[in-house]
Amino acid sequence: MSKNKKISILKVATGVLSIFILLSLLAAMIPQPAFAADPAQTACAARHTVKSGETVSSIAATYGVTWLELAQANNLKDPYTIFVGQVLCIPEGATTTPDDSGDGTTTGTSQGPTFTVTEDNNFLNIKTVDYPKSQSHIVKVGKTQLRWSWVRLVVIGRFATDENGNSNAYIRLPKEYRDTEIYVCLKNAFTDKIQCQYFDPFE
């Protein structure tokens, strides 16, 4: 083999190696996504078995946690897909009580503070019982995004409970949230505590 041919092969090999090293360096510089904690390492207040028709948002609302907290507790990534029969970790701080079905799972039900929602002439009538006394609460509503299984909440008003923790508030409902299924959430104005429930105006 001639000297010139050897030099050409060496240049090609050197070029290929240089490109490989450059690509490796570029890959190392790309920010890696932050993964949620492993569910096995997350403290769970309960376990929930996914049923037909449920979404990340509807399950989170049932237990009084946010959809993001539920997704992070179970290492769910966009588009936050869940499957029937899948067992989810309900993060600590959720409102839960043992199910009487005897299958060892739990379902979310209200304990202590509760609220009810009805609609009257484009106003939400929100009644609270045993809520924190004489405190302000922010009212948020949102529509389920079926494709992505999450709810974007918007603030529509606020109200205050009386000295017994009760209230009977009327909040005007924005036009885009009328005559449709929505989630209604009450957030304590002084803490991160939030409680949500599903509301169907046609029921």
Image (spheres, rainbow, N blue to C red):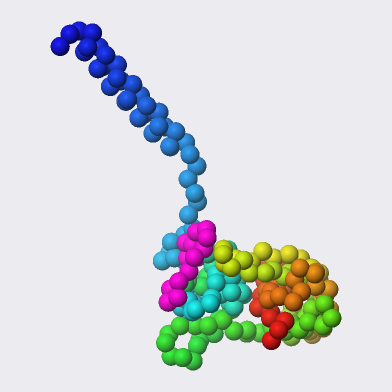
Work out which quarter of the rendered image holds the N terminus and state it: top left
Residue 159 as seen in the image, left or right of residue 37: right
**Residue farthest along the top direction in this orientation:** 3
Which residue corresponds to the image point at 80% horizontal and 73% vertical from the top-left? 173
- Residue 66 image offset from top left, x and y in percent: 61, 68
Which residue corresponds to the image point at 48% horizontal and 69% vertical from the top-left? 82
Q: Is residue 82 covered in magenta?
A: yes
Dominant SS in magenta: loop
Residue 190 as seen in the image, left or right of residue 82: right
**In this orientation, which residue lies closer to the viewer: 18 or 159?**
18
Work out which quarter of the rendered image holds the C terminus and state it: bottom right
Residue 147 visible within the image? yes
Magenta extent? 73-86
Where residue 8 sits, quadrant-wise, is top left
**In this orientation, which residue lies closer to the viewer: 80 or 101?**
80
- Residue 47 image offset from top left, x and y in percent: 47, 77
Count every numbered label the image shows and give the total.
Answer: 0
Q: Is residue 200 covered in magenta?
A: no
Which residue corresponds to the image point at 71% horizontal and 75% vertical from the top-left? 180
**40 lies above or below 14:** below
Where residue 15 sits, quadrant-wise, is top left
Residue 180 as seen in the image, left or right of residue 49: right
- Residue 125 image offset from top left, x and y in percent: 80, 81
- Residue 80 image offset from top left, x and y in percent: 51, 63
Which residue corresponds to the image point at 48% horizontal and 76% vertical from the top-left? 50
Residue 94 visible within the image? no
Residue 32 as seen in the image, left or right of residue 115: left
